[in-house]
Image (cartoon, grey):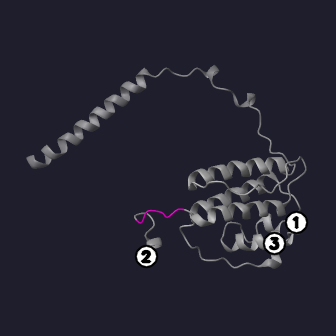
Amino acid sequence: MSQNYIVKALPLAVILIACTGLAQIGQQSKAKPKPEDAPSISKRKPIKVSDAPVTQQEAAQSIAIVEKAVKRVLKLKGGSTPLIKLGSSPVTRDAVVLEFKRLFEEAKPNFEIKPTMEPVDRARFTLKNPKAVEAAQILVAYGTVGPVAPLVSGSKAGMSVQEFGDALGFFLARIAELTHVPDAKWSPYLHGG
């Protein structure tokens, strides 16, 4: 081995030895947890997802949280009035679609990416309100709602917790994607690379 190689590798070796020593000292100083400190699996309450449909109140509160976050991130002022009435009755898919369309319109001036418009098959929609059908057509075309998702093609008027959560999460992810241009280093195809 050449002496030059040893001189270059020496600082790396010193750093590795020092890190190993520090890690061993850190492990020795940690107190071992006692078995009685950890909750036993049998004592934990199981998580139960309700089979009840999402209420108007729950939907309105969830959408308000999302709207507040979107407005803060996009620096939006004002906005339109929420459309979902507060109450304990199940929220309809039509009302959720119209609410998503309202949020979509608020965020649209901040879109940085022009997406490829998705094909829309209105025959698959099971929404009752004509305004909701028109809104769903736009939302599906922009890819913010799935073309055959339970939100637009479901068999029930209401939505389960899982269906509502999936629809809201998908919608928010797509709005985030449309309003943000990734760095060219990580997404060169968006910048012609």
Give the alpha-carbon distance from disc 2 to disc 1, as whole Å.
42 Å
Give the alpha-carbon distance from disc 1 to disc 3, as whole Å.
15 Å
Residue designated by label 1: 155
Q: Position of residue 112 (x, y in %)?
A: 53, 67
Q: Residues in magenta?
A: 180-184
Q: Amino acid at mark 3?
A: Val
Q: Amino acid at mark 1?
A: Ser
Q: Nearer the viewer, residue 89 or 32?
A: 89
* Element on which disc 3 rests: helix
At 8% from the left and 46% from the top, the residue drawn is 3
- Determine crowd level at label 2: few under 14, some 14-19, many 20+ residues with C-alpha closer than 10 A: few
Q: Is 156 rendered above or below residue 137?
A: above
At 75% from the left and 74% from the top, the residue drawn is 137
Rendered image quadrant of residue 75:
bottom right
Residue designated by label 3: 133
Q: Amino acid at mark 2?
A: Gly
Labels 2, 1: front one: 2
Q: Is 182 rendered above or below residue 121?
A: above
* Element on which disc 1 rests: loop
